[in-house]
Amino acid sequence: MIKFDEVAKQVSILRAAEFCGLTVKQYRSPCPACNQGGERALQFFTDTERFKCWAYEGKMWGDSVQLVSHVKGVRQGEAAAMLVSHFSLKVDNEKAPEKPKTAPQGFDPAKYRSTLITEHELLSGIPPELCESAGIGVAPKGAHQGKVVVPLFNQAGEFLVYASVTGLTLPKNWRPK
Ligand SMILES: [Zn+2]
């Protein structure tokens, strides 16, 4: 993944305009994407390195990556990649995708789970075996005090957070394995 803002930082708005083949006069140029608004549809701000398209419905603001994206009608990722290759930019694109957010540090789900009340009127209809194996219960204290809580996991099966729920029900015919 290329970081768009890192790319944008390395290409000034006017260089990006030039890359798009725009003829800039007095910080203005036509917008070939909107194809209206005349010679001054696009405005470039060299102090903030941003552009504004006055022709675009609802106006459009952005940095150099967004300019290329707008003018060439490509996604920002493509626009960033175009700039990187055209200007031979060095950007940190080796970064692994950000780790999914896991539980706040110091929170021990196993410990929390061991404090849960598994026999409670709020859990009627939920087999105790399921509470036991899934880690469902009623929180005796804390933010979810007195509520039914269930642990949530990401797709990799890593624990994310304990969420409180109301009206937890199961399919009628469901039985624990
Ligand atoms: Zn435009």
Image: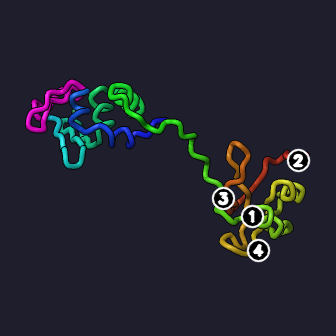
Please tell me which residue is depicted at 29% across the width and 41% down the height of the picture.
Answer: 63
Between tags 4 and 2, which lies in front?
4
Q: Which residues are magenta?
A: 20-40
Q: Quadrant of the C terminus?
A: top right
Q: Image check: 86 left or right of 28? A: right
User: Label 2, on which residue?
Assistant: 175
Q: Quadrant of residue 64?
A: top left
User: Label 3, on which residue?
Assistant: 103
How far separated are the C-alphas under marks 3 and 1?
9 Å
How far separated are the C-alphas under marks 2 and 1?
29 Å
How far separated are the C-alphas under marks 3 and 2?
30 Å
The amino acid on which the numbered mark 3 sits, given as a three-letter code, is: Ala
Sequence order check: which comes first, mark 3 or mark 1?
A: 3
Residue 33 on the magenta segment: yes
Element assignment for label 4: loop
Observer-nearest residue: 70 or 118?
70
Q: Quadrant of residue 58?
A: top left
Sequence order check: which comes first, mark 4 or mark 2?
A: 4
Please tell me which residue is depicted at 25% across the width and 27% down the height of the picture.
Answer: 19
The amino acid on which the numbered mark 2 sits, given as a three-letter code, is: Arg
Residues packed near mark 2 inside 10 Å, few (<14), some (14 to 19) or many (20 plus): few
Q: Image check: 39 left or right of 176? A: left
Residues packed near mark 3 inside 10 Å, few (<14), some (14 to 19) or many (20 plus): some
Q: Quadrant of residue 105?
A: bottom right
How far separated are the C-alphas under marks 3 and 4?
20 Å
Residues packed near mark 1 inside 10 Å, few (<14), some (14 to 19) or many (20 plus): few
Please tell me which residue is depicted at 68% across the width and 63% down the height of the picture.
Answer: 164
For the residues bearing labels 4 and 1, Cβ distance under 8 angstroms:
no
Sequence order check: which comes first, mark 3 or mark 4?
A: 3
Residue 129 horizontal/vertical position (percent): 90, 56
